[in-house]
Structures are given as structure tokens and as C-alpha cells.
Image (spheres, helix red, strand yellow):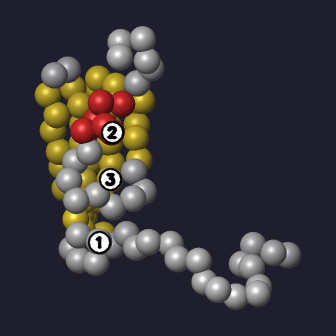
Amino acid sequence: MSDIRRAQLVLALRRSGVRDPALLEQLASDGVLVLPIGQAHGAQELVRIRKSGGSVQSERLMPVRFVPLVAEKSKASVFSP
């Protein structure tokens, strides 16, 4: 994958149980990945992962709670004027 441009910053807005190797692969050297890690309906933490050369370092930032967006069945749309 050397001909593919890699991202300097990846911000994942979905909860993950673990670090996703596919996201790390897309990250450039000296890049940063920020994502929530934890259980869907339990404890989660916002984690910053830095990739530098061949090493990967992670840092816990704060407890968070990412919840799924759910479409409510109604006639009125939130986005309608």
C-alpha cells in the first residue's frame, strides 16, 4: 500500500471494542487516531493513538459515552423548515 496516501488524523465517531488495525493502517507515520473504545452500553474511554515510525502509543483521554443514533418514527423531520 505504499502508493496510497495515508491520513495525518483519523477521528472515529463509532464505538469500538478494540483498536481497529484497518484504521491504524490508514494512519500516516506521525499521525493521530482518536476513537472511543469500550462496550456499547457500558464504560467507554476516548483514546488518542499516535503512530511514530514503527511504534504505536496510546493515551486514555477521558471517559465518554457514544450512543447509536436512532431514527424516531414520526411525521415531522428535525431537519425540515
Quickly name the residue at label 2: 23
Residue 31 in sight from this viewpoint: no
The three-letter amino acid code for the residue at tag 1 is Ala
Q: CA distance from mark 1 to mark 3?
A: 13 Å
**Neighbour class for label 3 at 10 Å: few (<14), some, many (≥20)?**
many
Q: Which mark is residue 24?
A: none
The three-letter amino acid code for the residue at tag 3 is Leu
Query: Considering the image in quadrants, where does the C terminus appear?
Result: bottom right
The three-letter amino acid code for the residue at tag 2 is Leu
- Image vertical order of residue 45 relative to residue 47, above or below: below
Instruction: Identify the secondary structure beneath mark 1.
Output: loop
The residue nearer to you, when weighing 59 against 14, is 14
- Image vertical order of residue 76 relative to residue 67, above or below: below
- Image vertical order of residue 6 relative to residue 75, above or below: above
Q: Which mark is residue 35?
A: 3
Query: Considering the image in quadrants, where does the N terminus appear?
Result: top left
Q: Quadrant of residue 39?
A: bottom left
Q: How many marks?
A: 3
Instruction: Identify the secondary structure beneath mark 3.
Output: strand
Does residue 15 appear to the left or right of 44 in the view shown? right
Residue 19 in sight from this viewpoint: yes
Indicate which disc, 1 or 3, sits on the residue closer to the N terminus. Answer: 3
Does residue 2 appear to the left or right of 42 in the view shown? right
Q: Nearer the viewer, mark 3 or mark 2?
A: 2
Q: Quadrant of residue 44?
A: bottom left
Quickly name the residue at label 1: 40
